[in-house]
Image: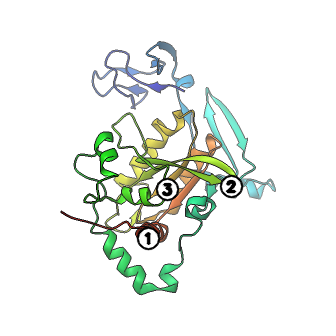
Amino acid sequence: MHYAKCYNCDVNYEWKKGLFCPKCKNIYADKVYLKCDNGQSNEISVYEAITLTPNSKLLEILARFIVQTKENFDIKHQGFYIRNNKLIYFHNISSTELSIKELSTFESIDTNLQINNPNEYKTLKNEYKQIPEKCKSSQKTNCSNCLSNPYLSCLMKMFAYIETSYKPQPHKGGEYGDASFVSEVNNSQQNIKIIMKSEEKNGIVLPSTRTGREIIVQLITQYMRDSYNPILMILTPSQIDGYLKADIRNLVKLKNGKVVFAEEKEFIGIYKLAKAKGYKLKSK
């Protein structure tokens, strides 16, 4: 897969009555130069360069019309996209979304704590809010050194107490994912890539919020290019809007991939498990 960059400026294109370079202001209405990962450039038509994927709202509307024609259309397993002026339909038999307990690493976490013990749930929620999401100098070397330093803590570090295969992956613009680990899923060892986002002020990650847009951009520009096709874990101590979840599922479905949503109750369950294994906020 390619990603579209301006041939002159090497800047990502935007769409403005054709592909538009925000730096040199050139508009490529009919043709575009695409640069491969190995640096080789190719000239192709705009229609060949773009894949149009419907969002969840459009799929929901279309599903209502299709049902009226007495045809079956299950938006959880079926979908389509448009490429080179052709509509391509696909049908995934297996479900795109996994529950967190389908990962052997987290099969013992308590996801019903808010109901079973609301006081403990509230205490744990107040505790993790005191732990920084990440340190100010989150680089790969610093993160590796931090794993053996009992005086440093961040929210991602709690995975180090749960899973020995945990690897922190602080990233720059050309990368995605904050950490990875290996877990057994359906009797098979799978690589899990975590995209972690901090708590939303209003408590819900919406498609229109900065966090929601960042997740979608990471999926489109990076995950869709990842040949390893890891299982994605979207981790946030907030709730994720239903339409945003559906948009994420649709993109993952295009790769025949899998996604796990770990929201507030799962997040607190992970924190409780890590705490039971020795993780806590420490200071010098």
Distance in Å between CA atoms under marks 1 and 3 = 16 Å
Q: Which residue is mark 1?
A: 268
Residue 281 can be seen in this image: yes
Classify residue 182 as left or right of residue 210.
right
The residue closer to the viewer here, 29 or 153, is 153
Of labels 3 and 2, the one closer to you: 3
Of labels 1 and 3, the one closer to you: 3
Crowding at mark 1 (Cα within 10 Å: few <14, some 14-19, many 20+): many
Classify residue 29 as left or right of residue 154.
right
Classify residue 175 as left or right of residue 78.
left
Please say if 224 is above or below 97.
above
Between discs 1 and 3, the one toward the N terminus: 3
**Which amino acid type is shown beneath numbered disc 3?**
Glu
**Which amino acid type is shown beneath numbered disc 2?**
Ala
Between discs 2 and 1, the one toward the N terminus: 2
Q: Quadrant of the N terminus?
A: top right
Q: Position of residue 167 (x, y in %)?
A: 43, 46
Displayed quadrant of residue 57: bottom right
Residue 56 can be seen in this image: no
Secondary structure under the numbered disc 2 in the rendered image: helix
Q: Which residue is mark 3?
A: 163
Q: Which residue is mark 2?
A: 63
Distance in Å between CA atoms under marks 3 and 2 = 41 Å
At 35% from the left and 43% from the top, the residue drawn is 170
